[in-house]
Amino acid sequence: MSNWFHRRYPHGLLGLFLLASYCVQAAHLEQGPMLGHVGSQEIRVWVRASAPASLGLMVSPSSNMEGATLYEGPSLEVQTDFNGHVRATGLTPSTRYHYAVVLDGKPVMSAPYPSVMTAPLEGTPTHLRFAFGSCVGHQGSLAAAAWGQMASDPSIELLLMLGDNHYADSTDPDVQRAAYYDHRGVAGFRALSSRSSVIGIWDDHDFGPNDSDRTAEGRSESLRTFQSMWANLAYGQSDHPGIYHHFQRGDIDFFMLDDRYYRWPNRSEDHGDKTMLGARQWAWLKSGLKASKAKLKFIASGSEWQKNGHLDSWTSFRREQLAFFEWLESEQIEGVILLSGDRHFTGGYQINQRVIEITSGPLGSNNYATPNLPEMFLNHGEGKLYCVFDIDTRDATPKVVLEVHRAGEGLIDRRDFTMDEINGKARLATLPVRQPAPEMASESDLPLIRSDRFEQGAGSWLPTDQNAWRIMTQDGSKVYSLHRQSAYRPPHRSPVNISRLKDVVVGDFDLLARVLTTQRDYGHRDMCLFFGWQDPEHFYYVHLGQAMDDHANQIFIVNQAPRVKISEHTTQGTPWDAQWHTVKISRRVASGSINVYWDDMETPVMRATDRTFLSGQIGLGSFDDTGNWDDVRLYGQVLEP
């Protein structure tokens, strides 16, 4: 006994004490392993240890880890709260590998070991099922049902986390890490992330405070924390920080964007330089899309792309938003599908009848159900939701299927898309958009003068050319249609298609109407509203043009001369599509203020100040295009002609 003791513990009782002390203090696996990037020849794994340790990874094609290769990783230090990730390289494509985490040279996992299939060789046709979602909730338990359901589906190879991956609402590293730990400690997430690749980008709540942007104090700390907590393939570019990166799965490309680090404040004015992504990230994205030979290209953003979004979305970056859609068209980039989160509901859009966007969530947050929006073909607003894309590119024509899952219920919706629909050569049927009430007290603080839904005709209106206007039925109701070019020729360069409300002169007024353009898509596609009308040589008008220049998408005055813009502020263009939109003009004579609103009735898209004409008639029309009008409401005080 004594000889055995001294052989085993040659330093006697002191040695036994030191060994016991080491056993107590030795690092163990606190959280993880979470698979990050899984490529054709590499895997990356994130862990959190309980104490400082050197990180390693054993990898073997054998389930018992026979002949395992040890890959050394970084030292896990107190500065990162013992977080980090390790990379195993030189692997074989499309091969299943088992792995085990190693701390200080010792395995800290036991059989059965988790396993993962490496990706197929880049450019190779493949079958991939990947899940995506956002908005996990303020506590980890809120998304537990979604994680549990997802973990029960072994076919999911990849999970994209599209922002609001926690709700720390802070740039403080300790606060952010605590929020990460809360969510990553959920059993379903641990089970899923140990065998499926998990890739993340951020949105506002996991970048900083609500609606945060590049002005957030501590954004560099947020970036460092993100880099330690996610085992992504890359983070920005070597000389340009951020979290954006690109990776491939066979012949499918993924472009993961950073919508916060370079983002201007949502409410800042755009003088041609306002940006969400920054010039370098835009150049990187466009270069990557042009170079891509992938059959499908997924572009992921925390903020929603569609054109009728809320303040904290691409809607606040209209110039960049519309320019990107135009660029995709002009460069004939095909196979693009947009992914997004943030909105606490799951929706699908075909933007400009061309580009499909799917926004997915919430995984755990409260629902913010939304009414059907223009261009929307999918809308689910109840329960904890996530989506799965099932992609098969092994045939000449790829198969693309979207699944919507609700925790506790499973699959609740399934849509398959043709490549013609993805490339905008075939239009998806959109959901019906609820018609707004013809009169709403909140629309104006002035009394209602006239409301016209044209159900009784257009007898109150006086067009410049009667043959250019008619009443027609659309979507079950009557509309006032400017259906052809007017024969009217004004005395000065100004619109030719005009119909004025008879015998009503106003000073202060609020004019609202719904409008739909029926013109083909081109730069100066427009509709117009008229006010302050004295006669054909004296009036104002608002030109809602698709592209802005000195003669389009401005507020103009005609004063015994060709029209002259008087706008002090405007946008880069009006986002015309095949949907109805609401426009409003608010005019106050004493101050001379003229404000124009488009869909969003809180933030004007155009502003001007002018007191040349203190009263006049109002009208509808276009410079030289066609379109339909409905639900006209005029508030104000009727004046003597």
Image: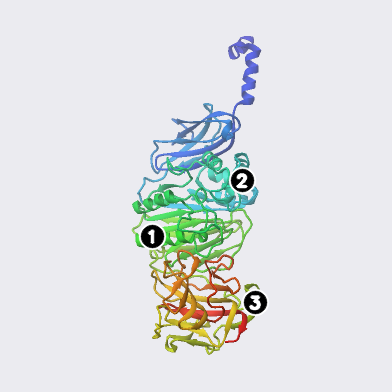
Mark 1 → mark 3, Cα distance in angstroms: 43 Å
- Under mark 3, the amino acid is Leu
Q: Nearer the viewer, residue 261 or 175?
A: 261
Residue 217 seen in this snapshot: yes
Residue placed under numbered mark 2 in the picture: 170
The residue depicted at 45 percent of the width and 31 percent of the height is 71
* Relative side of 236 to 331, left or right: right
As drawn, 263 above or below 306: above
Mark 1 → mark 2, Cα distance in angstroms: 35 Å
Residue 421 position by quadrant: bottom left
Q: Nearer the viewer, residue 235 or 179?
A: 235
Q: Looking at the rendering, in which quadrant would you find the C terminus?
A: bottom right
Q: Nearer the viewer, residue 193 or 421?
A: 421
Where does the image place residue 1, in percent across and percent down from the top left?
64, 11
Mark earlier in primary sequence (2, 3): 2
Label disc, if present, on residue 149 of the rendered structure:
none
- Under mark 1, the amino acid is Trp
The local secondary structure at tag 2 comes to loop
As drawn, 566 above or below 319: below
Where does the image place residue 132, in percent across and percent down from the top left?
51, 53
Q: Residues within 10 Å of mark 1 (few under 14, many from 20)?
A: few
The residue depicted at 42 percent of the width and 88 percent of the height is 467
Which of the two discs, 1 and 3, sits closer to the camera? 3
Q: Residues within 10 Å of mark 3 (few under 14, many from 20)?
A: some
Which of the two discs, 2 and 3, sits closer to the camera? 3
Residue placed under numbered mark 1 in the picture: 327
